[in-house]
Image (cartoon, coloured by chain):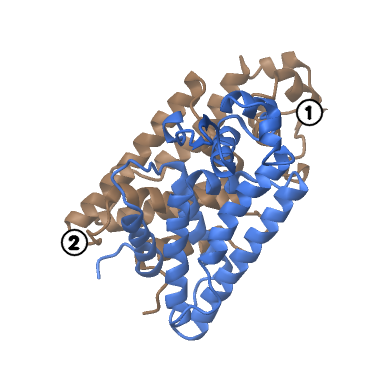
Chain colours: A brown, B blue
Amino acid sequence: MTDQTLPAAPARRGRPGYDRQGLLHVAVETFIDRGYDATSIATLAARLGLSKSAIYHHFSSKEQILAAALDEALDALEAALPPTAPGGSSRRLEHVLREAVHVLVARLPYVTLLLRVRGNTDTERAALTRRRAFDRRVTALIEAAQQSGELRTDIDPRVAERLIFGMINSIVEWYRPDGRESADTLADDVVGLALTGLRAG
Amino acid sequence: MTDQTLPAAPARRGRPGYDRQGLLHVAVETFIDRGYDATSIATLAARLGLSKSAIYHHFSSKEQILAAALDEALDALEAALPPTAPGGSSRRLEHVLREAVHVLVARLPYVTLLLRVRGNTDTERAALTRRRAFDRRVTALIEAAQQSGELRTDIDPRVAERLIFGMINSIVEWYRPDGRESADTLADDVVGLALTGLRAG
């Protein structure tokens, strides 16, 4: 993450400032750069050029900022798996994998932060619980697609889910929004690899 | 990582102690638990129940311990990709993927440490350079297998390599040596996913 990716401070009532979303964005970048534990509200205030009270106008605590950031990633991921998606389980799986790549690319710092959560606070544990529930729903989808004969049955659905999301999550390590790979191409690559593999024809 | 995975202190000349490999193993576990920067030779000495000079008998510095640990992972990974492997490029790719899973399982803490390296010291930068050279050799293998018609050509070989090793590397996040999945099964799963995908034949 470089400062280059920070949004320009949006004008608000004629003076420089940040709305809630802009403030959240800078906070997430700072958590990623310095680590959540090493970042204080004072650190954020200095980086934003705001007073601490200007931050408290939007968020009651540092943990509330983290909670809002993790919600941003989790809400988007959960929306990628609607219970009423049309098509068979394999089509629904394809849909959720494709959408998960788009969520990752569109909310790269938020997903990066989510992937660093280790469960040290109530907020982190709640995020991990939601993430595990999402993983279980994807695993159930793989299992259903195996039972209906759409997917191979010689792989444990839990292992398949972990390997495929391991592949998707690893994208945060190298993806650059200004790189050659578009989100659409990357989503095609992930779905192609996960469902049909690299082998020709 | 739990203390359960630490080796019993091997007997040496009739008194309790650690040989170089045993000392290295405990150091790697400690680096993973506490972070490399937060671990001093004094920390290691306390954890090992040794004097600092007993550690200096084997290693000249903390950085030399890190270098030895990273070599352990990198030597094994590089050995997985012999230049003279028999078979076509696709067979060689299958071989290196399978072996990379075995290396990860057999040297879980060493590979975990390698994956956390961010290039903060000369030792870390040298390890990253070796790792990138390995990745380039795998990418070249994918490219060769695409040119010979063995693999699909509608995916950038660099992206394919990153996605597949993202999948392999993610195994360190959840693999437990005492779990249900054997290294052989896991290697089959990874090779199957990467080459032929989840979809039923």
Left or right of A176? Residue A185 is left
Parent chain of label 2: A
Residue B2 visible, this orientation: yes
Locate residue B90: give its quadrant: bottom left
Instruction: Judge by depth and name the residue closer to the eye, A52 or B11.
Output: B11
Left or right of A195? Residue B100 is right
- Determine which of the numbered discs, if any, sits on residue A165 in the image: none
Locate residue B187: give its quadrant: bottom left
Left or right of A139? Residue B133 is right
The quarter of the rendered structure image containing the C terminus of chain B is bottom left
Using the image, determine if residue A197 lies above or below residue A140.
below
Residue A75: percent from the left, percent from the top?
45, 35
Instruction: Judge by depth and name the residue closer to the eye, A54 or B189.
Output: B189
- Label 2 is placed on what type of residue? Gly
**SS at mark 2?**
loop
Parent chain of label 1: A
- Label 1 is placed on what type of residue? Arg
Instruction: Judge by depth and name the residue closer to the eye, A60 or B66.
Output: B66
Q: Residue at x 40, y 75 (%)?
A: A199
Residue A141: percent from the left, percent from the top?
27, 49
- Determine which of the numbered discs, if any, sits on residue A47 in the image: 1
Q: Residue at x 81, y 25 (%)?
A: A49
Residue B154: percent from the left, percent from the top?
49, 75
Farthest residue in the front direction?
A: B14
> Which numbered disc flags the more N-terminal residue, 1 or 2?
1
Residue receiving disc 2: A149
Distance of label 1 from label 2 (alpha carbons): 54 Å
